[in-house]
Image (spheres, rainbow, N blue to C red):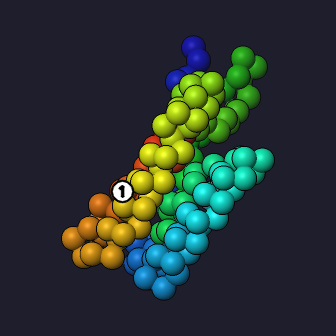
Amino acid sequence: MQAQPSVIVLKSGPNILVRFVWWLLIGWWASGFVIALAWVCLALVVTIPAGIWLINHLPSVLTLRPRTQTWTLGQDAEGRIVTARHGRPQVFWLWRGLWFVVVGWWASALWMAAAWLVQFTVVGLPIAMLMFNRTPFVANLYRY
């Protein structure tokens, strides 16, 4: 009888206080720089992959938010212990590309500009953090 594989979700990274201090001292202005740099990369067309990479890593720049990693621990047919790293299921790459060309490039610009401005209000700070964390999805349907 083969045992069911175990799923381990790893969320490492600094605690919430360190992440808030990072945002207070560095994250708010660094995120503005990354947003501007990402859009320069997108405008130059040849550097679109770099722009998308920057957008996908915006939550880490803003608050040091680490990517969640999921590991599966199980056994193979010979009984050896094996591990496999899994990401979140992603939308088919062709649909992601079409979304970016038709909607993502302009929608994410408006989304990030609104989030960057909202973060400076006490009430809007949590909303801005949520918006920045969803930016990769708005831009190219990337599930963070």
Q: Nearer the viewer, residue 46 or 128?
A: 46
Q: Residue furthest left?
A: 123
Horizontally, is 80 left or right of 55 in the view?
A: right
In the image, residue 50 lies at what x, y percent? 71, 53
Horizontally, is 78 left or right of 106 in the view?
A: right
Residue drawn at point x = 38 percent, y = 62 percent: 115
Q: Give the quarter of the figure containing the N terminus.
A: top right
Relative to 109, residue 139 above or below: above
Viewer can see residue 53: no
Residue drawn at point x = 61 percent, y = 32 percent: 97
Q: Residues within 10 Å of mark 1 (few under 14, many from 20)?
A: few
Q: Nearer the viewer, residue 54 or 16?
A: 54
Relative to 82, residue 8 above or below: below
Amino acid type, mark 1: Leu
Residue drawn at point x = 42 percent, y = 54 percent: 110
Viewer can see residue 48: yes
Q: Nearer the viewer, residue 83 or 15?
A: 15
Q: Which residue is mark 1?
A: 130
Residue drawn at point x = 58 percent, y = 35 percent: 101
Q: Could you say whether the residue bearing mark 1 is in a helix, strand or loop? A: helix
In the image, residue 49 lies at what x, y percent? 71, 47
